[in-house]
Image (cartoon, grey):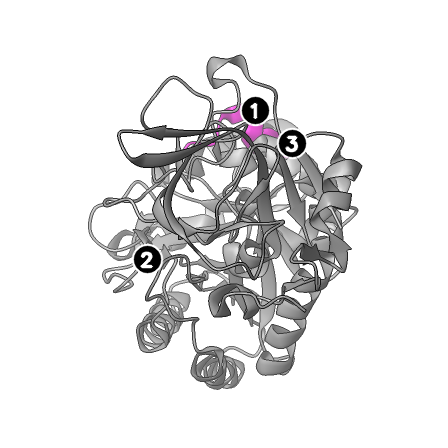
């Protein structure tokens, strides 16, 4: 078998003796033929299943596992995940319809987001899902919609804590935020719930995302539960669910190390035991997106042209930032760094030249790999961008410059 770089092999991929990447046991060229064209995304069921199995084993049934649909809402993948998780968390009316289409019971779906429209609130109430309320104003609009529909709304309060998740790629709690209700404002809102047409279910506390530091996650989760227990003393009825978010990161860049799951899981099990002792009616839940699907996805494009400009090698491909904004460095990176990239039909060949991989767009931002050491590649070769299962297709400006959308495959 051809040898894969360690950072790629650790994610569960392999290669044929001829140097062709294998995805779920299938040669990359065969997947390209199945897709019918390039570029395409491929998501591996086996790698998703393995990640969920490792989490389930580590959490020992003590903590519920939710999937954040925004990470990747591809319907076949979402249906596959819905059969294995305890809940789906959505962030728009469109995602709500996708979640309901999986057949998961409405009581296992929740809806977060700071700008829910009246129509979205009404649809959520009618469906019977839980709405993670983000402000006093939204709570009033939600109550009005429930009155109009003649049925109570299932409501959890999303709390903006008075602390941050240190080391998070994106901070969504602590300080002044558009997300959630400031913790100090929550007791007053809880006191008024009894007079509103709502069924209180619990709290949602999401501090941040993409964290690779186990100790910081453990600290944040402990503080989140402590806050939830403190706020629960003001609730009209005991909560049934405490969702303390996720934040589990995956390694993208040189020097990144995979998150150490064991200490995080051990801490979560301890927190679940604490919760069971103090609020036996409530379950503890975590909400994960990229950690479940990010490493299980690839983006594949084809080299159209090879050119040398003043001594610098460029591979021009049929894919780019319009399909994969994050890999181009334009989705949250302050300083651009390369995702893991391989020439998918030349695995095991020695890197021999510094190469820049670009797309077909008329902008210098259209960059998939900048000055990476790669094997010599020619037109027709397949470029593979790893760690592409989350925030890829659905987080990209697909209509920019009018190029065709990529194909998506679940394999």
Residue 301 seen from this side: yes
Point out residue 408 in the picture as x, y percentages from the top left corner.
Answer: 68, 37
Residue 198 seen from this side: no
Residue extending farthest to the left is 175
> Element under label 2?
helix
Point out residue 31 in the picture as x, y percentages from the top left corner.
Answer: 74, 44
Circle 3/circle 1 CB separation < 8 Å: no
Image-based side of 71 in relation to 101, left or right: left
Residue extending farthest to the top is 402
Badge number at residue 187: 2
Whole-angstrom CA distance, mark 2 to mark 1, is 28 Å
The dominant secondary structure in magenta is helix
Ranked by sequence position, the earlier of labels 2 and 1 is 1
Image-based side of 202 in relation to 26, left or right: left
> Element under label 3?
loop
Point out residue 104 in the picture as x, y percentages from the top left corner.
Answer: 75, 51
Closer to the camera: disc 2 or disc 1? Answer: 1
- Residue 328 falls in which quadrant of the image? top left
Closer to the camera: disc 3 or disc 2? Answer: 3
Mark 1, residue position: 119
Closer to the camera: disc 3 or disc 1? Answer: 3
Q: Is residue 117 one of those drawn in magenta?
A: yes
Residue 176 versus residue 394: which sits nearer the camera? 394
Range drawn in magenta: 115-123
Residue 300 versus residue 353: which sits nearer the camera? 353
Whole-angstrom CA distance, mark 3 to mark 1, is 38 Å
Residue 228 versus residue 110: which sits nearer the camera? 110
Q: Is residue 187 one of those drawn in magenta?
A: no
Mark 3, residue position: 38
Mark 1 Cα within 10 Å, few/some/many (few <14, many 20+)? Answer: few
> Element under label 1?
helix
């Amino acid at each position: 078998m051809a040898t894969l770089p360690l950072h790629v092999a650790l994610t569960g991929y392999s290669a044929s003796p001829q140097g062709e990447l294998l995805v779920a046991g299938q040669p990359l060229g065969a997947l390209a033929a199945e897709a019918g064209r390039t570029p395409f995304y491929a998501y591996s069921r086996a790698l998703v299943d393995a990640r969920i199995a490792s989490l389930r084993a580590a959490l020992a049934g003590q903590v519920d596992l939710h999937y954040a649909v925004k990470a990747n809402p591809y319907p076949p993948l979402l249906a596959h995940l819905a059969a294995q998780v305890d809940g789906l968390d959505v962030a728009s009316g469109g995602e709500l319809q996708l979640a309901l289409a999986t057949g998961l019971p409405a009581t296992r779906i929740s809806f977060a987001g700071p700008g829910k429209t009246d129509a979205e609130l009404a649809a959520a109430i009618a469906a019977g899902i839980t709405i993670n309320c983000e402000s006093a104003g939204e709570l009033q609009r939600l109550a009005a919609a429930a009155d109009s529909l003649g049925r109570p709304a299932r409501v959890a309060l999303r709390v903006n804590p008075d602390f941050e998740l240190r080391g998070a790629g994106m901070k969504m709690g602590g300080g002044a935020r558009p997300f959630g209700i400031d913790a100090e404002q929550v007791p007053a809102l809880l006191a008024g719930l009894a007079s509103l047409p709502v069924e209180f279910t619990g709290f949602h506390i999401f501090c941040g995302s993409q964290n690779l530091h186990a100790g910081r996650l453990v600290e944040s989760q402990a503080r989140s539960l402590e806050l939830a227990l403190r706020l629960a003393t003001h609730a009209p009825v005991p909560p049934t669910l405490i969702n303390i978010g996720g934040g589990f990161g995956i390694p993208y860049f040189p020097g990144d190390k995979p998150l150490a799951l064991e200490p995080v899981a051990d801490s979560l099990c301890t927190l679940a035991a604490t919760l069971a002792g103090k609020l036996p009616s409530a379950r503890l839940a975590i909400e994960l997106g990229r950690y479940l699907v990010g490493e299980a996805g690839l983006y594949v494009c084809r080299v159209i042209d090879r050119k040398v400009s003043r001594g610098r090698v460029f591979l021009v491909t049929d894919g780019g930032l319009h399909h994969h904004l994050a890999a181009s460095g334009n989705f949250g990176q302050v300083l651009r760094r390369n995702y893991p990239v391989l020439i998918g039909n030349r695995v095991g060949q020695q890197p021999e030249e510094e190469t820049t991989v670009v797309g077909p767009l008329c902008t210098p931002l259209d960059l998939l790999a900048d000055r990476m050491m790669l094997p010599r590649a020619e037109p027709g070769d397949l470029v593979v961008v790893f760690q592409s299962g989350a925030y890829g297709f659905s987080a990209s400006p697909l209509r920019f410059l009018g190029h065709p959308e990529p194909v998506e495959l679940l394999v």
